[in-house]
Image: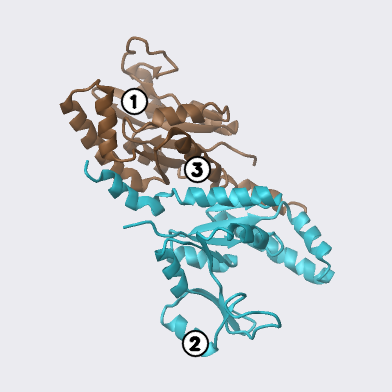
Chain colours: A brown, B cyan
Amino acid sequence: MSKKGILFVVSGPSGCGKGTILSEILKDDRFYYSVSATTRAPRPGEQDGVNYRFITRESFEMAIKEGRMLEYTEYCGNYYGTPLDVIDQKLAEGKNVILEIEVEGAGNVKRIRPDSVLIFILPPSVKELRHRLEKRGTETADVIDRRIKKASEEIRCAAGYDYIMVNGPLDEAVADMKTIISAAEMSSAANKYKIDEVLENA
Amino acid sequence: MSKKGILFVVSGPSGCGKGTILSEILKDDRFYYSVSATTRAPRPGEQDGVNYRFITRESFEMAIKEGRMLEYTEYCGNYYGTPLDVIDQKLAEGKNVILEIEVEGAGNVKRIRPDSVLIFILPPSVKELRHRLEKRGTETADVIDRRIKKASEEIRCAAGYDYIMVNGPLDEAVADMKTIISAAEMSSAANKYKIDEVLENA
């Protein structure tokens, strides 16, 4: 058995800065970002295979039936999910795969793939998160209230993750995520093959 | 709730280089090295409280009875164990506590303290370990054979640890252990209190 990649699941409330941290991590080509599949129509500017893999309802339901979705959910009449095919291929190639999904999906992934590593990104405070959303200026006060409520519910789920990191200054947050990744690469789950290697020709 | 220390359990076959790595880690005063208690008599040069806490059989058995030993074992007619008192005090003060114990004791600690972090240090190979022992020149071939057999048995237990690191060059091994420690400090077990903090004044 040789070195396989590790499946990382990253969650955090909207506006917590996940995307910025991940784009730094993904500069390293040992990582592959898993693109979700959806049955919803592409919005202007969205590209197939970049923002989502846009597939038909029929294909999605077939994939569910055949066990080819690691996790999925239905939201506003559309399916969203994580196709297994590319993930397993990348992991077999030794690449670390990053899934950026919501708390419910993350829990499902952990149940099916106990060796996956769940990382929750906390905003410095919910107060600060509200401030960030207000500064963006793209949402009404009512929408911001609802998003803060949702964020608080998500944050309560952080206890079920393997790691919790706080998103402060970007360079520190990126360093923190790299530390978690390096440690995960030393987890016994990822290193059982080393035991056999070390015992060889004793 | 504020930040408590983390209990690290470090194991690895004799001659794997544990001591050298730990002495580097322990230069940082955020760490406390837990000294085992024993009922055996001190050997020439051994100091009470440094090599072991030398206590009477009576005190040791009383400590077992009163649940004041985190783990213990009897070996060649003497008790060896880890007293809880100092450990819990140091953890409460926010210090990380390091226990350097054998695989059996490590498993017992993990059962009683599931939040403890178990690190196994692998030698680069068992062949290399044999070479190191032979180079020391302090043991007969027969003793070395028995130690290699014991080491191989211990290494098979590494799969039950949280992390496995290979002891190559000292600076890399120390960096690896520091990475594991930093990641453990971001584990959700060690950071549940942060969830409440972040949710405050939402």
State whether residue B34 is above or below residue B122.
Answer: below
Amino acid beneath label 3: Ile
Q: Say whether mark 2 and mark 1 are on the same chain.
A: no
Output the chain of dot 1: A
Residue topped by disc 1:
A80
Q: What secondary structure is marked by label 1?
A: strand
Q: Which mark is residue A180?
A: 3
Residue at the spot 49% in from the left edge and 66% down from the top edge: B109
Marks 3/1: CA–CA distance: 27 Å
Percent from the top left, x then y, of residue A51?
Answer: 40, 19
Most distant residue in the left direction: A142
Residue A112 visible here:
no
> Which mark lies nearer to you, 3 or 1?
3
Circles 2 and 3: CB distance less than 8 Å? Answer: no
Q: Position of residue A195 (x, y in %)?
A: 65, 51
Determine the CA span between mark 1 and mark 2: 63 Å
Toward the top, the furthest residue is A44
**Amino acid, disc 1:** Tyr
As helix, strand or loop, the secondary structure at mark 3 comes to: helix
Residue at figure coordinates x 31%, y 24% from the top left: A79
